[in-house]
Amino acid sequence: MIGKAGIGALAGLALASIGCAHARPAPEVHVERGFYGPDGALLGPAEVANAASGVRYVLFGETHDSACDHEMEAALLEALAANGMPPVVGLEMVAVSEQGVLDRFGDGSIDLADLPAALAWQENWGVDFAIYEPIFATARRWGLPLLALNLPRDLVRDVARAGIDGLPPEERARLPAIVPPPPEQESMLREAWEAHAGQGRAGAGDEGFRRFVLVQSLWDSQMASAAITWRRALDREPVAILAGAGHVVNGWGIAWRLRAYEPEASVLSIVPWRDEPPAGAPGTLSFRCGP
């Protein structure tokens, strides 16, 4: 990941509940909280579902510690399910080693209140589980399969420290085929690396940057690869992937790897609108979540 960090029963209520007005910083302009199309038009639940119609992968870029972002994710899942497109839900927040826990939650063997302990959520993710509850509650209400997409933290740490060649064969076997980032993403990655290096969380020099890019590429490749594997195994779509915004914006991150592994893949990205509206682009929606 990059950084750490109820909804109503009906989709109409779900998105209506996020329809209160918030003022943008620019004077005389007011923007409602909700989903927006590439042309800047506010979308209702059915319109959101229509935008995802026929799409294999729906990527939602969140800020991990934003409660409102997770309410919006739950509203998206609700809209898709209520409009006849119940998605499979892929989670960056959960490592593949915990898939059995998600399965037991899905079949009712684990209650929502017991899920964070069963997943060792605080230890493994570190963001308050309470703000993620709308997602899990919505998945349970609609019977949506939950998929663990990420690699265990200890394996990612080993890659960051030793590189892939330094891993024992059994650990290398757990990794996906890693797809490097597009060249145009390098400047953003370098800025992120410099910020981490300045805080003592990334190695210095060219080797430090190379390892940083490797880890980011590993995360994105892993999530894309796991999503494709599950879509094919379950023979079901769309797969809604919930991940940090850094994995979704600009069609980089996960989308870049999905198309590398599966060139015919259709992808809808949903990215955050904070201070300024994101540039509208085909295959991209935005969501507004606070001033």
Image: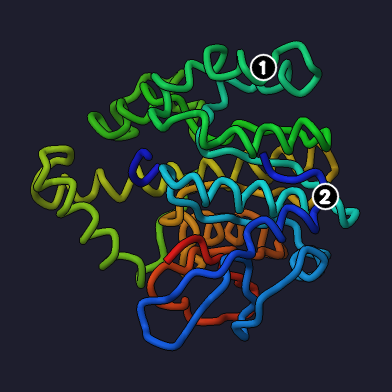
Q: Mark 2: which amino acid?
A: Leu
Give the quarter of the figure containing the N terminus: top left
Q: Earlier in the sequence, mark 2 or mark 1?
A: 2
Q: Nearer the viewer, residue 129 or 96?
A: 129
The residue that disc 2 covers is 10
**Location of residue 216 in the rendering, given as x and y in whole percent from the top left corner:** 37, 47
Foreground disc of the pair 2, 1: 2
The tally of labels here is 2
**Location of residue 13 in the rendering, given as x and y in whole percent from the top left corner:** 77, 54
Q: Nearer the viewer, residue 9 or 217?
A: 9
- Residue under the image location 44 percent in, 47 percent down: 66
**Location of residue 213 in the rendering, given as x and y in whole percent from the top left corner:** 30, 50
The residue that disc 1 covers is 100
Give the quarter of the figure containing the C terminus: bottom left
**Location of residue 151 in the rendering, given as x and y in whole percent from the top left corner:** 48, 30
Q: Is residue 103 left or right of residue 282?
A: right
Q: With respect to residue 282, does 219 lie above or below?
A: above
Q: Mark 1: which amino acid?
A: Gly
Q: With respect to residue 76, does 143 lie above or below?
A: above
Q: Is residue 268 left or right of residue 162?
A: right
* Farthest right residue in view: 84
- Residue under the image location 39 percent in, 26 percent down: 153
